[in-house]
């Protein structure tokens, strides 16, 4: 038996936004087994800064009466660690006033953080926010929804939703404005990706794995090389047992930083390079790893 985990928001909305809000409520309030509880094991993982556990715990609290503040607290902990899924949900928390005061600016800020990591649902949420602005920033909204469409497979429910959002936004734009928004989306995707942040001890150590994984593939696009490094690093460290407390902390931080993003990156790259047989062949290797 499956039950929806999120209660109806009491936040008033403009009539034009109701249909969009229903779509994103489904995306954020995902289904869990009926009777799921915030058990001690899950809380223990969350208290150890496991970002996935923090998001799961936060979502569980949203399903409880008077649990919104606690839910928002756990989602924020994961979002502040840079986890894109948590950043997306925290944007929704501010947009729907779930455990916090409604804050349009904070909603956009957190949606953008996730969107810039390639989180398709955050990109579509950001598009909806811009389209629903008082003055309707439809050109920017169209750019973000195009990025969202490029990040999901055409045969998915999300893609169908995004097409409807895109068409609604397009109805407010001229052909030349649509062309400009598409140019901006292409330019955004063409920006060279930085795989590793400066002055980050985790990233500094991961450059070793990056060099090993891309040996012989230096001619590949930067986004492909970054994904290969993320996936290889995640696989390597997931199988390692820390030999002391310092190493165990390093493994924990590294896995939280790299593993949650790897699957999202792979999906986006398969869509981006759908007509490139060589890139598809390489990406398919990681399906089996």
Image (cartoon, rainbow, N blue to C red):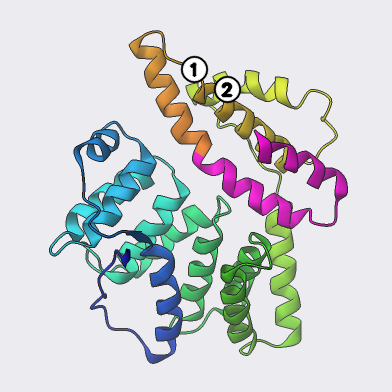
Identify the disc placed on residue 240: 1
Q: Residues within 10 Å of mark 1 (few under 14, many from 20)?
A: few
Q: Give the SS element for disc 1.
A: loop
Q: Is residue 121 left or right of residue 81?
A: right
Which percent across, then down, holds residue 224? 73, 40
Q: Is residue 62 left or right of residue 121?
A: left
Contact (CB < 8 A) between labels 1 and 2?
yes
| Residue bounds of the magenta highlight | 260-289
Which percent across, then down, holds residue 54? 31, 44
Residue found 64% across the figure and 21% down from its top: 209
**Quarter containing the C terminus:** top right
Residue holding disc 2:
236
Q: Is residue 19 left or right of residue 237?
A: left
Say above or below: 15 vs 229.
below
Q: Residue furthest front?
A: 1
Report the number of numbered marks.
2
The quadrant in which residue 167 appears is bottom right
Say above or below: 85 vs 194.
below
Q: 180 or 221, which lies in front?
A: 221
Q: 59 or 211, which lies in front?
A: 59
Q: Is residue 88 left or right of residue 182?
A: left
The quadrant in which residue 275 appears is bottom right
Residue found 71% across the figure and 21% down from its top: 211
**Mark 1 to mark 2: distance in Å?**
7 Å
Magenta-colored stretch includes residue 275: yes
* Residue 80 appears in view: no
Which percent across, then down, holds residue 88? 43, 57
* Residue 133 appears in view: yes
Q: 156 or 118, which lies in front?
A: 156
Which percent across, then down, holds residue 238? 50, 25
- The secondary structure making up most of the magenta span is helix
């Amino acid at each position: 038996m499956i039950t929806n985990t999120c209660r109806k928001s009491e936040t008033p909305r403009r009539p034009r936004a109701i249909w969009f809000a229903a779509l994103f409520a489904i995306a954020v309030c995902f289904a869990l087994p009926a009777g799921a509880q915030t058990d001690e094991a899950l809380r223990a993982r969350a208290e150890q800064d496991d970002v996935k556990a923090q998001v799961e715990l936060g979502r569980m609290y949203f399903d409880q009466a008077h649990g919104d503040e606690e839910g928002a607290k756990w989602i924020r902990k994961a979002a502040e660690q840079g986890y894109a899924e948590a950043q997306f949900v925290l944007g929704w928390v501010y947009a729907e006033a779930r455990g916090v005061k409604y804050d349009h600016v904070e909603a956009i800020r957190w949606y953008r953080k996730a969107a810039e990591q390639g989180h398709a649902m955050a990109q579509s949420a950001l598009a909806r926010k811009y389209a629903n602005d008082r003055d309707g920033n439809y050109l920017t909204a169209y750019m973000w929804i195009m990025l969202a469409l490029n990040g999901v497979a055409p045969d998915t429910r999300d893609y169908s939703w995004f097409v409807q959002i895109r068409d609604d936004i397009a109805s407010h734009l001229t052909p030349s404005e649509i062309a400009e928004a598409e140019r901006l989306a292409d330019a955004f995707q063409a920006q060279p990706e930085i795989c590793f942040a400066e002055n980050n001890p985790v990233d500094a150590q991961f450059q070793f794995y990056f060099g090993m994984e891309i040996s012989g593939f230096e001619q590949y696009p930067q986004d492909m090389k970054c994904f290969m490094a993320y996936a290889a690093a995640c696989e390597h460290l997931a199988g390692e047992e820390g030999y002391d407390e310092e190493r165990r902390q390093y493994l924990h931080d590294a896995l939280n930083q790299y593993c949650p993003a790897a699957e999202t990156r792979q999906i986006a790259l398969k869509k981006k390079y759908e007509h490139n047989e060589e890139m598809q062949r390489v990406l398919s290797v990681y399906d089996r790893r």
